[in-house]
Image: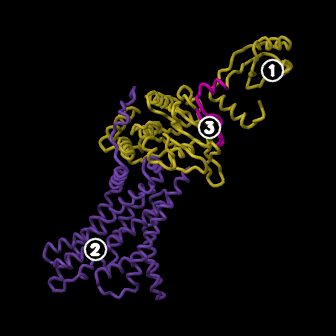
Chain colours: A purple, B yellow
Amino acid sequence: MSISAPRYAGGTFPRVGRSGRVLGLFLHELRARAGWGTWTVVGFSYAAVVIIVVLTAEFSSLLGTVSLSTLHAPYASVIWPYLVLIVATAVASGAIADDLGNRSITLYLSRPIHLTDYLGAKTAAVAVWVALPSIGPGVVGVVIAAGLGLLPATVSLEGIGAFVAVGLLTTGFFTTLGIALSTLTSRALFAGVALFGATLSAHLAALAVSGATGANGVLYLSPITDLLTVADAAFSTGAADPISALGALAVLLGASVVLGVVAFLRLTRVEVVGE
Amino acid sequence: MESALVEIDEVSKSFGVHPALTGVSARLRPGTIGLVGPNGAGKTTLLRLLLGLLPPSAGRLRVFGRDTLADPLAIRERVGYMPEHDCLIPSMTGIGFVAFMGRLSGLPREVALSRAHDVIQFVGLHEERYRRIQEYSVGMRQRIKLAQAIVHDPPLCLLDEPTAGLDPSGRAEMLGLLRTLSAIPGRSFLLSTHLLPDIEGLCDQIVLLNAGRLLASGPLGPLLAEHGGETVVRIKGDGAAFEAALSARGLAARRRRDELRLVLPPEGDRTIFEAARETGTQVRYLDRAVASVEELFLARVEAAAHPETP
């Protein structure tokens, strides 16, 4: 042990402002959420989506049928949304739950940052991770296909816009859902199981009930179906979806807002419960 | 008059129907302040109110002259907090954790890292700074908690039970660190503990809480002197008869363990020996009582419980 106190230079340290402190928390969280499993799924998403986009563009180019709907191919199945869900589960489940579990949230909030700063930095870091597989692969695929001369500039720009729009919606929904669930428990495992399990269950249950009863309205309860329906509309496929794209968009946006409010309200309670 | 570091004005705080603090008022000067009380006295609640982490149910608090509700960030920029419970991030290294906390307190990245090395050296964890916190012992965790509280060089540190869970040598080392820190000019510490001996020799002011109510606050020396003034008498013989003889001479003695305590009038020693001679008892010990914080606390608790007793 040292026999003297560190030589303080009290009051002479340069200080960063509130935005600098929030940036520090954001960057820390961004690094903390990086795991080899997450990187693997993200990498797989890029490989799969880019290959699908380029090959589809190649075939359409040969057939002379290139249009915006050509780029819809990655959204033709549920695989891509579920890859994004896996990444969201991995990064979002522990974002708040870990801090509640080890009670480090007390230390965060005893620093000069607001609760909204804390929640915002955590949400932003998770959103970046979720955006990596939900927005990036489609955009990269289009850029590569355009670079290979398989897509005209107009279709490329429209495709990038559609991938970004649907990707942002996916990112927003899965991020807020993951963060909200992460505030409800001090075990990241529970939040992760709830996030993946609830989404999968809602999807399968909605499909089963809709198939058995013919009541298509119940499909709005499945976020995956909502996302695919919005993607159909964004890429102008003209598919006859059982639910309205506008309704699905409203459900996802509304749910995201509600989940964000739930997360905030839950955290305001955590301080008191910590007593 | 020296400006107040902390002003607590008729503060109450309830959690649902459970009152944690009731009508607490105190004015604390810069220095080392002991916040003393048994478990559940409201010490942690008061610390969290001072940090602006909780709003008071009634009353107001000021730290550095700033209202804790109106300006919590400005207060937290200048305050370090060491919580009682384990609150560390187990997957981080000691140095990484302290530097990160420095960053959250507003230090630029390079400065935070440099300061983290300084304070980790100070708390004696230099050799273990690159180990993950999950590998730390209880004593090391307490030290890293202290390091994160002082990394940004705050003028005021709120320390919640800093010796909790430490063995005697660890406790002595922690108190030694606090003693060293408190000797630095311009640094104040509010030290919450239910271990009363911890604050003797360390604190120059005290706040006594019990069941959410303030028992006493102010400079420690005058409070102890005010509580002192008693004489301790130990006798061999019939204690009851001796007490009765004293009572007959107008001296009310109270029995505490194997001794009697009483407030003597001038030249009262003679009265004691007269009573001893009359009852055939031997006076084995006679001296002025040295008041301790524990005695002060117990006396105040008793006085609060029986306000009519002189």
Q: CA distance from mark 2 to mark 3?
A: 61 Å
User: Which quadrant of the figure has residue B215?
Assistant: top right
- Picture coordinates of residue B177, whole percent (x, y): 45, 30
Residue type of the residue flagged with mark 2: Phe
Q: In the rendering, which numbered label is found on residue B282?
A: none
Q: Is residue B221 magenta?
A: yes
Where disc 2 sits, the SS reads helix
Instruction: Evaluate if marks 1 and 2 touch, with contact meaning CB atoms under 8 Å apart.
Output: no
Query: Vertically, is A203 above or below B58?
Result: below
In the image, residue B108 above or below residue B197? below
Q: Return the residue nearer the eye: A99 or B180.
A: B180
Is disc 2 surrounded by few (<14), some (14 to 19) or many (20+) residues within 10 Å? many
Which residue has dot 2 on it?
A163
Q: Residue at x 64, y 34 (%)?
A: B216
Range of residues picked out in magenta? B206-226
Residue A52 horizontal side relative to residue B20, left or right: left
**Label 1 Cα neighbours within 10 Å, binned few <14 / some 14-19 / many ≥20:** some
Rendered view: B267 above or below B205:
above
Give me the chain letter of mark 2: A
The residue that disc 3 covers is B37
